[in-house]
Image (cartoon, helix red, strand yellow):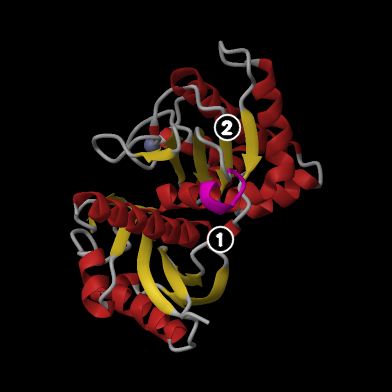
Amino acid sequence: MSAAEVYAGIDIGGTTTQVLLCTPDLSVLDRAEVPTPAAAGGHAMMGAALDALRLLLTRGYGRLLGVGVGAAGVVDTGTGRIVVASDSFHDWSGYPVTATIGAALDVPAYLDNDVNAFLRGEVACGAGAGEPDLLGIALGTGVGGALWLDGALYEGPNGAAGEIGHVPGFGELPCTCGGRGHLETLASGRSIATRYAERTGRDATARDVADAAGRGDPDAIAVYDAAAAGIARAALVTAGVLDVTTVVVGGGVSRAWSLLEPAIRRALTAEPPVSGRPVRLLHARLGSDAVALGAASLARTELAADRTGMASAS
Ligand SMILES: [Zn+2]
């Protein structure tokens, strides 16, 4: 038997870092999850991820071909550096992620924004497998978006394409980004909790609000209905402009899918794009593995492109 080959995917989140080892067809072989030492700085964060990956590599699954990393914030995919990180990450802006991994493990490494990686994962081996044109919406603490057009991730000239969580037209409420009336003010976990507290005076997490809605609490239902209406609007606007056929919705808030889905679907059916074809609605399938698997798929895609490039250049 020839030696097996493996890829690694790393998801560096605000609280935990997840590392997956997978086969070239993205079947997960092994995994590790460690706390992200965000307050201790970039070297500590990268060190924790590398330690976890090295441990998995000692288990003999095969030769590591490449590493993909999905990280929150604005990243420069070309240089493999973090450009802008949230305040909770110490000494992370500017950090050379791919160079550090390359030096430590002597393999090629690739970096992407976590929401882009989420969509890459869902397209590579999740709910959107094989779909050429999608909008991805990740409903977490905030609301992230990503675009997959004509079979490839579309980053845009500033790396910010698909950021549907932060365009105006979704009401008047102030957003965490400093803007107003963004989808994030309706559909993020934080906003769902805030909107419910405004209506009822009660502190609750987004999950608590979902539970309350399940018990028939009208305020909780109204908050989730507003989130669903916003998500549908985001999908309709994007489909109208770019002719994406499909929207895939993931992230922790989407666990309340039974609350969100009927209202999103109703709105999508009621207002089809000018093509007359209603936007397809999919619930993300990879759960918390999506970012790491998407990062691994990025490494796979880039390595294949490098090899093709080398072959045609020689
Ligand atoms: Zn915003």
In the rendered image, residue 151, in percent from the top left (x then y), is placed at 45, 37
Element marked by disc 1? helix
Q: Residues within 10 Å of mark 2 (few under 14, many from 20)?
A: many
Residue at the spot 46% in from the left edge and 62% down from the top edge: 292
Residue at the spot 56% in from the left edge and 42% down from the top edge: 130
Amino acid of disc 2: Thr
In this picture, residue 93 sits left or right of residue 26: left
Q: Which residue is mark 2?
A: 246
Residue at the spot 38% in from the left edge and 83% down from the top edge: 54
Q: Residue 303 is drawn in which quadrant? A: bottom left
Q: Is residue 119 magenta?
A: no
In the rendered image, residue 255, in percent from the top left (x then y), is placed at 66, 51
In this picture, residue 292 sits left or right of residue 245: left
Q: Which mark is residue 44?
A: none
Q: Which residue is mark 1?
A: 288
**273 w.r.t. 65: above or below:** above
Q: Residue 176 is drawn in which quadrant? A: top left
In this picture, residue 61 sits left or right of residue 45: right
Query: Furthest-front residue in view?
Result: 314
Q: Is mark 2 within 8 Å of ligand 1?
A: no
In the foreground, 87 or 220: 87
Query: Furthest-top residue in view?
Result: 274
Magenta range is: 123-128
Amino acid of disc 1: Ser
